[in-house]
Image: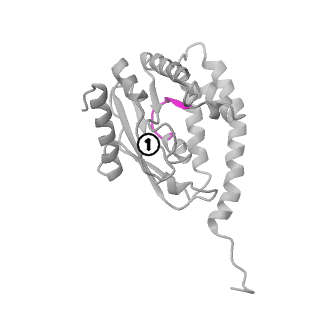
Amino acid sequence: TPGKEHPVPVNVLLAILGYPVALGLILVALPVQALLLVLTAPFDRNRTVPGRFLRIIGVLISRTLPPWRLGVEGRWPEGGPFVVVANHQSVLDILLLSRLPREMKWVAKEELFKIPWVGWMLRMSGDIRIRRGDAESGGEALARAREYLSRGMSVMIFPEGTRSRTGQLLPFKSGAFRLALETGAPVLPVAVHGTARGMPTVVATREYIAANFRNGADIQETIRMFIRDAYAKWGLQYV
């Protein structure tokens, strides 16, 4: 209305406060993670401690913006290690999945490892980089994933290979399922819902975002269907 002042939306104010806090967390976290790496390297081949530290930082960053209401439903199953697979809707998925209760080594695109500070933290965590569209790089990434699985460390893969721009599932690539076939590791499906709306722009919406292990939501059933199809294609038995 002309001549009338409009208040700044609460979400904008929270973002103005939240993003500098998140940046500060990242800046402080790197030297701490480096120290943890040095102290634990002699007995921590899987880099479990620096990796878990990075996931905790991800959880803390997700709490810097109250409009993000993230939650995890279900329990981590007994046994393992697992080839963990999840659909990919948004950058926010990374913060959400950091809440899962076990350390995993993430297969992530090479570009992330080139980002100053963030990329250095991914390297110190022992995460696995992959150059998209490069078969040789894909083979190297799977080899590293096999090594981790052989040492009891679960591996996290987005089988769509990239973020979905629409929130709809993209076709699954075969790498995660070939890895499960070759190593005998069970596949643990995680369904991510709501993150495409939770972080479409700078200001997040007030959505409840949940990752569920084999529960009744439609998206979980859809993911199970995709996984059953992949199992059948690669000769695996779906349990």
Q: In this view, does 67 lie above or below 22?
A: below
Q: Is residue 167 above or below residue 54?
A: below
Q: Residue at x 40, y 37 (%)?
A: 172
At mark 1, the secondary structure is loop
Left or right, residue 229 beside residue 173: left
Which kind of residue does numbered mark 1 sit on?
Answer: Asn
How many numbered marks does the figure carry?
A: 1
Residue 9 location, quadrant: bottom right
Q: Which residue is drawn at 54% across and 30% down?
A: 133
Q: Residue at x 45, y 39 (%)?
A: 160
Per the image, is 100 magenta?
yes
Q: Which residue is drawn at 35% across and 30% down?
A: 187
Residue beneath disc 1: 87
Q: Which one is in front, 124 or 233?
A: 233
Q: Which one is in front, 75 or 147?
A: 147
Residue 10 location, quadrant: bottom right
Residues rendered magenta in the picture: 98-108
Q: Give percent across and percent down for residue 49.
A: 56, 26
User: Which part of the image, by quadrant, shows the N terminus?
Assistant: bottom right
Q: Which residue lies furthest to the right in this view?
A: 3
Q: Give percent across and percent down for residue 153.
A: 45, 23
Left or right, residue 177 beside residue 228: right
